[in-house]
Image (spheres, rainbow, N blue to C red):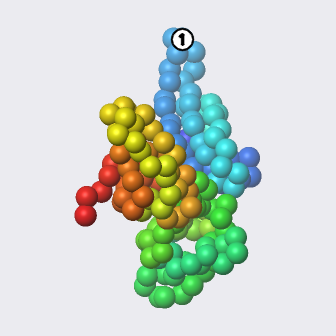
């Protein structure tokens, strides 16, 4: 097994029997103590963030992964049906694999699915930004548009996003799929 020093951000390791994605990995050497690696990881099954200190000589089980491009077709109950862009094979992806990104799944959006060496789905990577249309929001009065506050808006995927007061129904906005935050209004 490889040493923790050979692992980098974005690697997927098996930690305590479950797959974890390395979010950050920092090498620290405090004073006259032994060096260690401070790792922030995300459990890919539960979505929880985990912090752990690895000793410099500790070994980890790196999971061999394969990334494939898929296109989202439709929702089937709690699963999302995706199609391989090369072979046109369809698979069902559970909502848990998408995490918070499930709120921003539009028809025909391309995603990257990360498979483990045993063929199971570890992670679904959405595009960083997605353009969605606002379907419902409170109308803004003239006074509201002068202030810099926000208001809740429902977008075409059903997600709720806080948007500036000047956004109206029918506006197309760009949203960060990682955080669910409004980025900008899209001019078309």
Please give the name of the residue rendered at 56% of the width and 31% of the height, measured from the top-left corner: 38
In the image, farthest residue toward the top? 31
Q: Position of residue 135 (x, y in %)?
A: 48, 62
In the image, farthest residue toward the left? 188
Q: Is residue 42 above or below residue 107?
A: above
Please give the name of the residue rendered at 38% of the width and 50% of the height, measured from the top-left corner: 167
Q: Is residue 122 above or below residue 139?
A: below
* Residue 103 appearing in the image: yes
In the image, farthest residue toward the bottom? 88
* Residue 132 appearing in the image: no
Please give the name of the residue rendered at 74% of the width and 52% of the height, measured from the top-left corner: 17
Please give the name of the residue rendered at 58% of the width and 54% of the height, measured from the top-left corner: 100
Q: How many marks?
A: 1
Q: Position of residue 89 (x, y in %)?
A: 54, 87
Q: Nearer the viewer, residue 111 or 101?
A: 101
Q: Quadrant of the C terminus?
A: bottom left
Q: Nearer the viewer, residue 69 or 28?
A: 69
Q: Nearer the viewer, residue 139 or 5?
A: 139
Question: Mark 1 sits on what residue?
Answer: 32
The crowding category of the residue bearing disc 1, from other C-alpha atoms within 10 Å (few below 14, some 14 to 19, many at least 20), is few
Question: Label 1's element?
Answer: loop
């Amino acid at each position: 097994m490889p040493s923790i020093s050979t692992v980098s951000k974005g690697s997927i390791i098996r930690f305590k029997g479950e797959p974890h994605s390395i979010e950050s990995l920092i090498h620290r050497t405090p004073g006259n103590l032994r060096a260690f690696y401070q790792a922030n990881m995300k459990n890919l099954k539960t979505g929880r963030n985990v912090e752990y200190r690895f000793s410099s000589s500790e070994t980890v089980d790196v999971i061999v992964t394969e990334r494939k491009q898929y296109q989202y077709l439709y929702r089937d109950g709690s699963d999302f049906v995706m199609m391989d862009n090369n072979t046109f094979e369809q698979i069902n992806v559970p909502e848990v694999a998408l995490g918070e990104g499930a709120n921003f799944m539009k028809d025909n959006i391309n995603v990257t699915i990360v498979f483990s060496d045993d063929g199971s789905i570890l992670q679904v990577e959405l595009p960083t930004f997605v353009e969605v249309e606002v379907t419902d929001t409170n109308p803004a009065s003239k006074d509201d548009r002068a202030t810099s506050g926000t208001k809740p808006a429902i977008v075409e995927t059903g997600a709720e996003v806080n948007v500036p007061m000047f956004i109206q129904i029918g506006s197309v906005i760009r949203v960060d799929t990682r955080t669910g935050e409004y980025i900008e209004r899209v001019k078309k």
